[in-house]
Structures are given as C-alpha cells and as structure tokens.
Image (cartoon, rainbow, N blue to C red):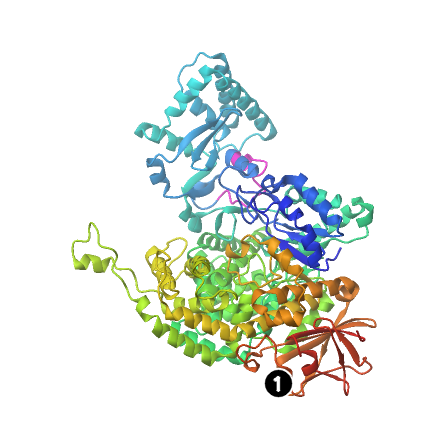
Amino acid sequence: MIPRATLRLQFHPGFTLDDAAAQVEHFAALGVSHLYASPLWTARPGSTHGYDIVDPTRINPELGGEPALRRLVAALRARDMGLVLDIVPNHMGVGACDNAWWQDVLERGPASAYAGWFDIGWHPPDPTLQGRLLAPFLGRPYGEALDAGELGLQADAAHGRLCCSYYAHRFPLAPDTYADVLEAAGPQHEPAWADALAAMRRLRETVGGAATNPGTGQDSEDAFARAQAALARALATPAGERALAAALARFDAADPAGRERLHALLERQHYRLAHWRTAADEINWRRFFEVNDLAGLRIEREEVFEAVHALTFRLYAEGLVDGLRVDHVDGLEDPGGYCRRLRGRLEELAPRRPAALRGDRAWLVVEKILAGGEELPDDWGVDGTTGYDFMDQVGALLHDPAGAAPLAALWHEQAGGAADFEAEVRAAKHDILNENLAAELAATARAFHAVALEDRATRDMTLQALQRALREFLVQLPVYRVYFRAGGRSAEDTAVIEGTVAAARATLRSPDPAVLEQLGRWLLADAATASPLLRRATVRFEHLAPPLAAKSIEDTAFYRYGRLLSRNEVGSAGSAFALGLDDFHRLAERRAGTFPHAMLAVSTHDHKRGADLRARLAVLSERPEQWAQTVARWRALNAAHRRSEPAPSGEGAESDADEAEAASPEAPEPADELMLYQMLVGAWPPTLVPEDRDGLGRWAERIAAWQQKALREAQRRSSWAQPDTAYEAACERFLRRVLGLDAAGAGHEAPFLHALAGFVDAIGAAGALNALAQATLHLTTPGVPDLYQGGERWDFSLVDPDNRRAVDFAALAAGRTDPRPLPALAAAWHDGGVKQALVMRLLALRARRTALFRDGGYRPLAVEGPLREHALAFAREAGDARVLVVVTLRASHRLEPGEPPRVPPARWADTRVRLPDGWPGDWAELLAGRTCTAEGGALALAQLLADLPVAVLEAGTR
C-alpha cells in the first residue's frame, strides 16, 4: 500500500471527481501510483479547498458524490493505481445553515446530543453567555444589525421550523420559544393551528427556560419533533399561512415594538448573536486558528471519532481508499492517541477489504510542522509527515550560507525591519495574543488560575500574573506544541519546556518569574496523575499553542520579514537560512531509518511560493552584493512612482488643503517595495517577454492579488480586520506603473520592466538548475514524493488562491510526448519540458526499482576536487541493487549568460565522486543516456554532468 509517488489534486465544483477520472490515463503515464485528494466530504457550498466540511458522512455532491468517487477509483484500479484521502478530524464549517450538528447545538443548547461534540465552554465569566454560545457572525454590532432590520424571523413551513435569519445565516429558535412566536398571531380558529400551538405550549412547560432546565433528553426531542410536525400540518393550510404571517409581523424589526419583541426573543436563545470582531475577546468555543466559521471538534470522544470517520472507514473497508493524510494533527487534544486509535481501527477493518488488498497496510501520514531539530514522535503509528520538513531541507540546501548576513543587512538597512527573524516572530506572537487570540489566552489563564486555587501553596497567584507568565511562555515556545501524556512528558518535550521557562524568565519582572516557574511545573505534569482541573488547563494550553505558532510564523512573520522570501515557507524556520551538504545527508539517513515512507513535498496547496519560484530566488543568496546594487538602482528608477498623488477633485474638495488631505499615501513603504521586487524576480514566467502586453497584464493581476494578501497578513499598514484600502490601492498603482501598465491597462514606456526582464534572464538558467536539482532530490531521496497538481512543469505559483488555479491537463498530456532528449530540452529550458521529462524519467525508475526506493538505504558519497561544495552525491541501495544520484548546487557563478542550466564540463576540472571500495567501474547514466566509467575509484563530474545539472546512474553499460 506504500505509494511509489502521489499526485495531489484540488477538488472543487470546477474540478470534480469525474474530471479527475477523465485524466487518469495522463496520471498513469506520468508515473504516479496514487492520487492524493483534497477533502472530499461535503463542504460549504462552492468551497474551493474542502476544509470547511459541514457533513463528513457524505461525499460532496458538488464533486459528483459517492457514485463519481466509485467511477474514479474504478479508473484508477484499472491502471493498478490507488487513492489517498485528506481527512479533517479537527474542525467543521459552521455558521450559515448547512451543518446539521451545529444547527442542533444552536437550537437545543447544552441539551443537544451534539453539544459535547464541539469544544464549547458553556459557563464563561460573561453572564450573558451562561448556557449559551457566542455566535459572532454579524457584519456589524448586534444593535446596529437589529436596528437596520438585518435580523428577522423566518419559517421553514415544510418542516415546521422557525429561525432567525441574517443573510445566508439561519439561527434556529429554541424549542421552548416557539410558543411565544405562535401566540403573537392572536386568537386563531383553525384546528390545525390550535393543535400546533398547544403542542408548543406543552413543550414550553416541559422544557422550561434554557437557563434553568437544559431539557429532558430524548423525550423532549420526540415531543419537539411531534410539535414541529403539527406546525408543518398547520402551515400547509391557507389559514395557517395567514396566522404565521401575522405572528412574524409582530417581530418585524422595522417597527420599534417589533424590534423589542425580536430582541427579547433572541435573548432567550441558546446563542448570543454578535459582531464578528467580538470573537477575539469573547468567544467561548474553540475555533480553527481564529476563523469564526470553523469550529473545533472533540475528536477524542469515542462517539465523535466514530461519527466523523464512519464514511472513511467504510470506504477503506470496501477497498476504495488506500491511505489517509490527517490534516492539522496538532489541533487535536491528543495527537498521538488519535493516530494510534486511527491506526488500530484501520487494522481492524483490513480483513474486510477485497481479497487482493487484504495484505496491505494503510499508508498514514500527518500534517505536522516540525521546528528546527524537532522530530516526529515514533510511537504514533504513522508513516511520517506530509513533507513540509523535506520541503524546508531541500530548499535550504539550495541556498548559499554566505548570503545570509549581507541579505539580512540589506533588509535591515533598506526596509528598517528586524535583522533577526525570531525577534519578528516574538513580536507577532505578542500581537496575535493581544488581538486575534485574546479570548483563548484569557480562557487558558483562567483554567490555570483554577488549578492555582486548588492548593494553598499557589492560591495567591493572581489571574493577571498567570496570564502574563503564560503569554511570555507562549511567545518564547520554540515549537508548535508539546504533548501531554500518561507517564509524563518525553525527554524532548521536557527539555523544550525547561528551556522555554528559562527564556521567558529573562523577560518577566518579579514576582512573575515565580509564577512562571510554577506554570512550568504544571506543564511537566503526568497526564495519568494530573487533577481534572490541571488536565483541563493543560489541554487548553495544547490547543492554544499551535494556532498561535502558525498565525505568528506562517501568516504574519513570513510577511513581515524579507531577508529572502524563498526561506519564508510553510515548514521552514526563517532563521535557518541554509543547510550544509553533510547536514542534508544526515537528515536523509535519519529519515531512511525512522520514517522511510514519509511524504516528501516541494509544492503544496498551502505553499507561499511554488517550488521553482523559490529555486530561482535562492540564486540571490549566491549574489547578495549584486542584488543589493540592483535594488538600489530599481528604487531610484521607480522613485517617481512612489510619490503621493492628490485624489481626483470632486465635490467636497473645496480647497487645495482639502485635496492634500485626501492625497493617496506614498507607497509602497521600503519593506513592501523590497518584498515586491523579490516576488517580481521570482515569479516572472520564463516564457513571458515585456512586449506581451496581454500576458503581462494577466501576470500583474496575480501579483496584485498576492500583494494585497501580503499587506494584510503582515498587519503593518493594512490587515484583514482593518484594511487600509488607500495604501493598498497606492501599492497596486505602483506595481502597474513600474510594469508599464496604467489603470486601463493600455500601458506606457517602463524602463524598470526591461531591467526586470533582463535581470531575470541573467539568473534564470541558474534558477532552472536549482529547480532540476530540487526535483531530482525530491524523487530519489528516502520517502514518498508527492507531486502537486501541474507541478511536473515549472511551478511559479503564488500563495493561495493562486496555487489552486485550474490546471491545463491537455497541455501537460501533450508535453509528455515531446520527442526531444533531455539535453535538448535543457537547452530550451524556458518551456518547462525538461522538468516534465526529468520527472517522468525518475518516476519510471521508481516503478522499475520499487523495492529499492521503498525500502533501500541512503549512503552519502564523498565529492572531491575544486568544486566539491557545488555537488551532492549519494546512493540508494538495497542488497546488490543501487542507484547513484549527483546534483549540482549553488553554481550560478559557474554559468555565463545565455548558457543552459548546467556547468560546462571544463569548469568542473578534477571534481569527482569517490566510489566505495568494491563498487563497479561502469555505470549507465539514465537521463542523458551515456555510459560513464570510473577511473581510480571515482567518477568525474565533467563526465557525469556534461549534458545536465543532475545525473542518475545504475551499475552496468547501456
């Protein structure tokens, strides 16, 4: 069941399961063994990513439903291929009206059968939320929305349901408040209406007020169902329709009295409607990160685990699914326990699978961000991570460490930004805790305060002191999370906690350090012996740390710190600029020994920049002085476009002073300008020329969308919560002007545009060389390589949604049949054909040497000679079978303008790969199609890399 290679596909209404089935022939010819699907369960209508699941019990009908899934799997099986699914156990989409479980919680409150399925705190300090949950889905403050008539009552006549409507949202009324609405119709003589009203009155008397009586379980549910059925019968009559209209009119917010009645009714619901901004300070349920319409699930509960995975387990048992990718595993209360339970259930189901598949073991990988030096626990029962760690390692390998200091100095001097990435992260964490996750921080502090009050030795630790200590501990925590478990923390987690206490101690004033020390002791507790209050507090901490780290690093610091954007990538530590050859070897050997079947990624649906964009930007690490000079010239060249301009004159602009006050801001600021230049260099399409106005315009639209997102994520001049649209518009105007595009797209002369194209042309071949080296390592080092959709050719995509654009599979299929040999394709590298041919050649090798790449070891090989730092060599071996791999690294200074992406043979001089004793002397190079012979126990790179920047060899002659 271990895939040879996977291909990630993003499913949405514009690309369905049947669309994928139509491309299976192409996927098979490409050489992957499994498709790796984005979440397929029913998501919010129109979802382009599938992570906002509202019903995990059905395949999304917008994707074709289960029948289409079966057709896709049949097409895959016909070509001996399989399917891996992305599952989402941490959260569900809420709000609107399409999540039945959430709607039931809104309707019944704590009495709902699903109330314990979501992580809701029913008794927060706010007295208005006792027994209620905050519903922060309004676009303006509640009072304003009510006064504006945006809230109103609505009926689902067919099912006898009443709700409060707000645009697409539907908030169901509590069962014991239906009678209040129906009574507003006044005396009615229709028997069916009288029956419905009587049933609702009995329900009100039985259930009582939500604050004093949470309901009477199944009896109450049955009574409500009968009452709703009676109401539906009444509403099926003309008299019932008239009575309902009369009742609802009494709650019309357009009338002051009706508005007061509606408010009074809403105050008796199991939710409190609120402006979306209130969530940061007052939310009393766990969200995914700080996203209000994604609610956390309590997957650790047995009934929730089984309900959420029921369809997954059935599809696995029926042989339709071969492996699972678990999304955001660190969001769970106990990731290790969850993974072991999931593995156990899959093993229980294995005997029920079709006979041909019963001997296989499900492939199971988890989305987990590993900080520098952190390792995936080996007792989770998984095959590894989803490959962000490899993406970081191979990316760092492409960077020249000598570029770190001068590029940091350039950033600090020109942009005024922090020279230290970690300082930027700490600042971002403070911002996120104060603004986005303030409610979660306060709730966690209260939980630890309750622990303190349990013991007379700690009861004088105040809530505010605990919150200060907790905040600083979280700010200093170097990993996404640690793991609370029976038997105590692991040695690694213990060291992390103790180190974090030491780091935080330096920033706190007396007496807070004593509180911090106690917090550290609590966090080191054994889950098996911890008190219920300590367990609850620690779990809250574990739930808070990962979203804080992700938001602070990936979604904030990466957009604030611009030393070199190719190192600001998901899974990367921006402070770790480069990776030495020996370190790369060490990590590859470790992966071969611990998680040989981990996924390997270079592009994903979450990446900030595509693999080949990052590979091109890495060239700047080899040329920091040239880049600094180029930036200086460009800033001077474009200075006129940064000048403020008065807004167009119009009514209200009565004087020059008024116009000056309405002037557009000078933009972009230096930090934003420097980041923009990097993106323009990195993302310039290889086949684009300045004269292609249409192509340039389309590309500028993509860059502008990235720029707006980058400005808002950085939260310096603009943000999602408070967008500075004037500054954003000025930045976009600057972009279009420097590219020679005016507001109408007609264009004008732009010297910068030609300077940009010339600079990209000068480093483009070196970037392509990096990209081919990266692709080769991706497909040959230990692990299961995942190709992101369309990534077999050049991937210069930007952050989502750009990286989820439609893929031209017809063009990719046509490219497969290109008859040119690899060296000829390399000479014409701009069109991406060389990468596609390389990928196909290596995937074919993996198919032919399946056991070697699946289970074989990794052996570093020494490179000797004058350019030894510019090549990495290793062998994959299993028994007597071996494949030797050599890639060129950091070689931009060895290329001349106009040369293809390879170092000419003469420049390698006497650089060679030393072979172990006893290895054969004759080797077949599989990419360029040549025979190479060792001399003196070594292979000359001038021979191995004569035609391409990479070589892959097998022993023997052709």
> Which residue ends up furthest to the left in the rendered image?
655
Q: Residue at x 51, y 74 (%)?
A: 763
Residue 208 visible here = yes
Residues rendered magenta in the picture: 108-123
Q: Is residue 66 magenta?
A: no
Q: Main secondary structure of the magenta part?
A: loop
Pick the front one: 765 or 450: 765
Please identify the quarter of the rendering in which residue 17 is found: top right
Pick the front one: 541 or 931: 931
Residue 425 image position (x, y, % from top left): 47, 66
Pick the front one: 921 or 498: 921
Q: Which quarter of the figure is the N terminus placed in?
A: bottom right
Pick the front one: 869 or 142: 869
Residue 621 image position (x, y, % from top left): 51, 76
Please say if 445 is above or below 626: above
Side of 649 where 361 appears, left or right:
right
Residue 571 image position (x, y, % from top left): 57, 64
What is the three-letter code of the residue carrying label 1?
Arg
Please say if 723 is above or below 894: above
What residue does disc 1 label?
907
Q: Residues within 10 Å of mark 1 (few under 14, many from 20)?
A: some
> Which residue ends up furthest to the front in the rendered image?
819
Helix, strand, or loop for circle 1? Answer: helix
Q: Residue at x 66, y 47 (%)?
A: 22
Side of 95 where 56 appears, left or right:
right
Residue 302 image position (x, y, % from top left): 66, 44
